[in-house]
Image: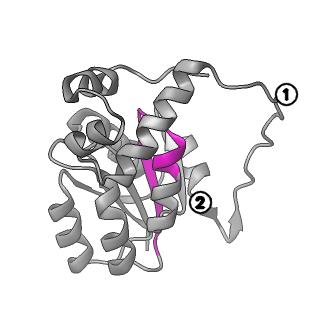
């Protein structure tokens, strides 16, 4: 029997492309476009692997990590995001995710992050090059700090803005920008 893979992502193109790629590799993939759909799918069947998009249309994918972990304790859970930050990484892992991966991601990187087991042997993860430590830029430090405070306030923009002593619209503009690489 093929391994079952649940994809929680509201992006139709990405989710269907990932589902097709997984099907070509022998997985049975099910796509859920909301946390509620994913919960319903988890009640109906057992999944071996789950990917959860961090930024869903109506809510944060982080709020679905713990309920899906509880419903599928044996599954390997991966949080995918286009807006990676240390705060959301820590929150995802604390909530029960096995790994966290920044987009763009392809099926190979997703399976590697999930430590996919092929014929009884784990796929070896590639050795990561060790970079010389360099300080983060001021812009990246600001982004990380905003993400940490946002996580502390459970994604509430108004209370985060008050905690940062910042106007809510200013905070929204900063969050709409892509994070600085370093």
**Residue at position x 23%, y 37% in the image:** 11
Q: Quadrant of residue 162?
A: top left
Q: Quadrant of residue 95?
A: bottom left
Q: Is residue 3 above or below residue 106?
A: below
**Label located before the other in sequence (2 or 1):** 2
Q: Is residue 84 magenta?
A: yes
Q: Is residue 100 magenta?
A: no
| Residue occupied by mark 1 | 132
| Residue occupied by mark 2 | 116
**Residue at position x 45%, y 48% in the image:** 88
Label 1 SS: loop
Q: As rendered, which of 67 and 118 lies closer to the eye?
A: 67
Instruction: Name the spot of residue 93 as percent of width and height, x first.
Output: 52, 61
Which numbered mark, 2 or 1, is in the foreground of this view? 1
Label 2 SS: loop
Residue 43 numbered mark, or none: none
Instruction: Name the spot of residue 99 as percent of width and height, x first.
Output: 55, 56
Instruction: Name the spot of residue 167 as percent of width and height, x first.
Output: 23, 26
**Which quadrant does the N terminus fall into?**
bottom left
Residue neighbourhood size for the residue with mark 2, other residues' Cα within 10 Å, grouped as few (<14), some (14–19), many (≥20): some
Give the image's coloring scheme. one colour
Q: Is residue 20 left or right of residue 99?
A: left
Q: As rendered, which of 123 and 172 lies closer to the eye?
A: 172
**Residue at position x 21%, y 30% in the image:** 168
Q: Is residue 32 left or right of residue 118?
A: left
Which residues are drawn in magenta?
75-89
Q: Quadrant of residue 42?
A: bottom left
> Can residue 64 be seen in this snapshot?
yes
**Residue at position x 33%, y 47% in the image:** 19
């Amino acid at each position: 029997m093929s391994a079952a893979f649940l994809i929680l992502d509201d992006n139709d193109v990405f989710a269907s492309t990932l589902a097709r790629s997984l099907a070509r590799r022998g997985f049975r993939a099910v796509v859920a476009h909301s946390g509620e759909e994913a919960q319903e799918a988890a009640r109906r069947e057992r999944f071996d692997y789950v990917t959860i998009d961090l930024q869903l249309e109506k809510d944060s994918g982080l709020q679905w990590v713990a309920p899906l972990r509880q419903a599928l304790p044996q599954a390997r859970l991966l949080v995918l995001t286009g807006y990676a930050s240390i705060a959301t990484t820590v929150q995802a892992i604390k909530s029960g995710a096995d790994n966290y991966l920044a987009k763009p991601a392809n099926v190979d990187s997703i399976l590697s992050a999930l430590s996919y087991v092929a014929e009884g042997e784990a796929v070896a993860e590639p050795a990561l090059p060790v970079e010389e430590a360099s300080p983060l830029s001021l812009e990246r430090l600001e982004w990380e700090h905003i993400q940490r405070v946002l996580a502390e306030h459970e994604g509430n923009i108004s209370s985060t803005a008050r905690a940062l002593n910042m106007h809510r619209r200013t905070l929204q503009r900063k969050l709409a920008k892509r994070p600085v690489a370093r």
